[in-house]
Image (spheres, rainbow, N blue to C red):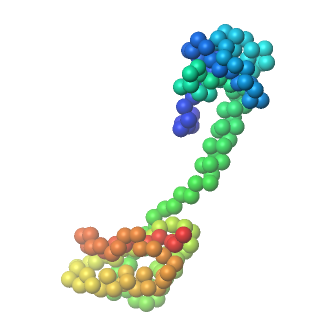
Amino acid sequence: MEVKTIAKELNINEQIRAREVRVVTDENEQLGIMNIGDALAEADDRGLDLVEVAPNGRPPVCRIMNYGKYRYEQQKREKEEKKKQKVFQVKEVKLRPNIEDHDFYVKLKSAQRFLSDGNKVKVTIMFRGREMTHPELGSNVLERVIKELGDKIICEKSPKLEGRNMTMVIAPKA
């Protein structure tokens, strides 16, 4: 499976369509403007490739370099950048409007663990039956969660009643 890259492929050797090109060596030495045949011959003499690095220039700029080595190093850099990216998930903690203290603190501890791992937490209050007539009980529980977690969190989505559930999303402070 081929990995797609953001950078477009560069034209090399016979793929270059310009008649004249500005040639630069692999040591950044300017060789001047040459016709494409002479530039290809110069690259071939050095045992390297002619790579079009600035196709929009007048004339286009080509560099004499080892293209295979260049692509290898570029892919290595892209892999390193990918490793440094932080991927977070949204974890969910489900509560009930009349939850007991011990159960509340167990769920709160789970939320704290998720937040310390750098994830966002969706706190959901599930209403059943006649509990729907008292949504203020659910909002009291959510306010209690915010108060217990203190200044370690940011409330990204404030409490909102959606059907039979009341939800809010919290994230760790940077």
Q: Residue at x 48, y 83 (%)?
A: 150
Q: Is residue 66 above or below residue 3?
A: above
Q: What is the x, y in percent for residue 66?
A: 73, 26
Q: Kindly tell me whether residue 50 is visible in this rendering.
A: no
Q: Total marks drawn? A: 0
Q: Which of the pair 11/164 is nearer the observer? A: 11
Q: What is the x, y in percent for residue 118?
A: 54, 67
Q: Residue at x 70, y 19 (%)?
A: 32
In the current view of this chain or complex, which residue is farthest to the top?
A: 37
Q: What is the x, y in percent for residue 37?
A: 67, 9
- Quadrant assignment, res 20: top right
Q: Kindly tell me whether residue 62 is visible in this rendering.
A: yes
Q: Is residue 47 left or right of residue 172?
A: right
Q: Residue at x 47, y 85 (%)?
A: 148
In the current view of this chain or complex, which residue is farthest to the bottom?
A: 101
* Quarter placement of the C terminus: bottom right
Q: Is residue 126 above or below residue 89?
A: below
Q: What is the x, y in percent for residue 15?
A: 59, 17
* Quarter placement of the N terminus: top right
Q: Which of the pair 140/152 is nearer the observer? A: 152
Q: Which of the pair 51/61 is nearer the observer? A: 61
- Quadrant assignment, res 128: bottom left
Q: Residue at x 23, y 80 (%)?
A: 132
Q: Is residue 20 left or right of residue 90?
A: right
